[in-house]
Amino acid sequence: MSADRPRDIRRDLVAALAAALLVLTAVVVGYLVEHRYGTLFVSAAPLYGRWGPHAGPGTAAAITVAVAVVAYGPLVAARLPWRWLLFAGWGTAASWTFSLALVDGWERGVARRLTTRYEYLQVISPVDRFHDIPAALRDFTHHILIHSPDHWPAHIAGHPPAATLTFVLLDRIGLGGGAWAGVWCVTVGATASVAVLVTVRALAGESLARRAAPFLVLAPAAVWMGTSADGYFAAVAAWAVALLALAVTGRRPRTTGLASGLLLGLTAYLSYGLTLISVIAGVVLLLGSRPKLRPLPHVLAGLTVVPLVFTLLGFNWWEAYRLLVTRYYEGAGGVRPYAYWVWANLACTVLIVGPATVAGLRRAGGAAVRVRTLVQPPAPRLALLVTGALLALLVADLSGMSKAETERIWLPFAMWLLPAAAFLPRPRAWLAAQAGLALLLNHLVLTGW
């Protein structure tokens, strides 16, 4: 970890300032492009939403959570027993996310998020198009294209059916409707920070994990973790990686390896883009203890289960993805200019992860280039982990299949950039910057998801 020297702090601030200029440029250029050509299809470029200063019932709670974490988070994270720290992290992340969501009120902030015309619940109520699940899966690809009969709403068409089936099954057990769906996404999504903590501890040591903890629970990403199903997807992907980290470091390699494989298979059927989580999983394998390949047969065995089940039920993943690409270019994706979004997406990422993560990534870059061995010390190992996440994110960016809305789509990758803040000295000042950004965004922008 870099020393707390004036030169290092200046470089941190320069990195944060450069990121802020990137965001400002994306806002100005985005406004000009949308005003003149109308091709961005966003009203608050580079974010999907619209400008609208507002406050709500969650405002006071969000400020309270922010102040508490800034004031006491680093101390509590350093002293609390590990198991209790995990529970505290989950509870704090959920409180932060719920309070930010409630700035928009219960109905708009939570209960109606997944009921709009684009969302998953549109095919459950009032008309249940999944009343016969095997039949719906066999017929799924016939409704992806915009011009197909009874085409799926955007999010159902844009994701494999496990995403929609999650809410179908919630409905089946009596937890139907937008309120339960919203609570599910926030509650499960908040566990993503715990999964990242578990991974960092397994691969880079408990000290760095404890330093990262306050930044994981107070991330600006919570603005979107509570407004879309992507927070839930992020948690599933994070636990898949966490269980793999436990497997390759000798923690019950058979059980954790099998469980990791099951979740890795599930991620591919929650979102097509989550196949890129394999990049982070590859880094975890690289960082694992010897013999690191021992859990692989169990991981691979678990990995086949979900794809096999969906294939036997009649869903063809590859055909669905091919059709999705066609639909993507039939809609706004075919109009939105790549030349803007290929860099403006990165401005969205800055808003997700905050200035502390940007400064931490600067320091992580220095730690990564000093790698001599993957056994010692822990700092380069954490640097490689966040570098893997950054690589996955850049691949998604260059693919052209992520033009806009990446503030929610890239949550599964952004969560793995947040631990870079563990490299920073003076955590309270950086935590205050993180909280300030999240509060500002949530009170100035009415997010679209």
Image: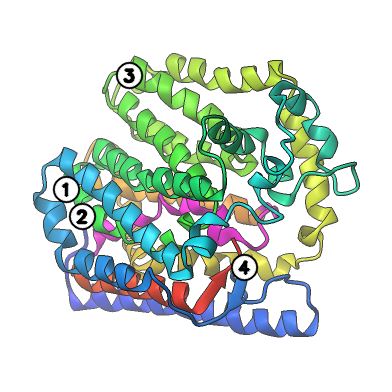
Which amino acid lies under the numbered mark 4 shown in the image of this protein?
Answer: Tyr
Q: CA distance from mark 1 to mark 2?
A: 6 Å
Relative to 288, residue 362 above or below: below
Please tell me how crowded label 2 is: few (under 14), some (14-19), or many (20+) other residues with Cα within 10 Å.
Answer: many
Where disc 3 sits, the SS reads helix
Which dot marks residue 253?
A: 3
Range drawn in magenta: 399-424
Whether residue 15 appears in this view of the structure is no
Which dot marks residue 48?
A: 4
Q: Which residue occupies 61% across, 44% down? A: 273
Q: CA distance from mark 3 to mark 4?
A: 42 Å
The foreground one among 282 and 56 is 56
Where disc 1 sits, the SS reads helix
Q: CA distance from mark 1 to mark 3?
A: 23 Å
The foreground one among 94 and 270 is 94
Residue 33 position in % (x across, y down): 73, 80
Q: Which residue is mark 1?
A: 207
The foreground one among 40 and 367 is 40
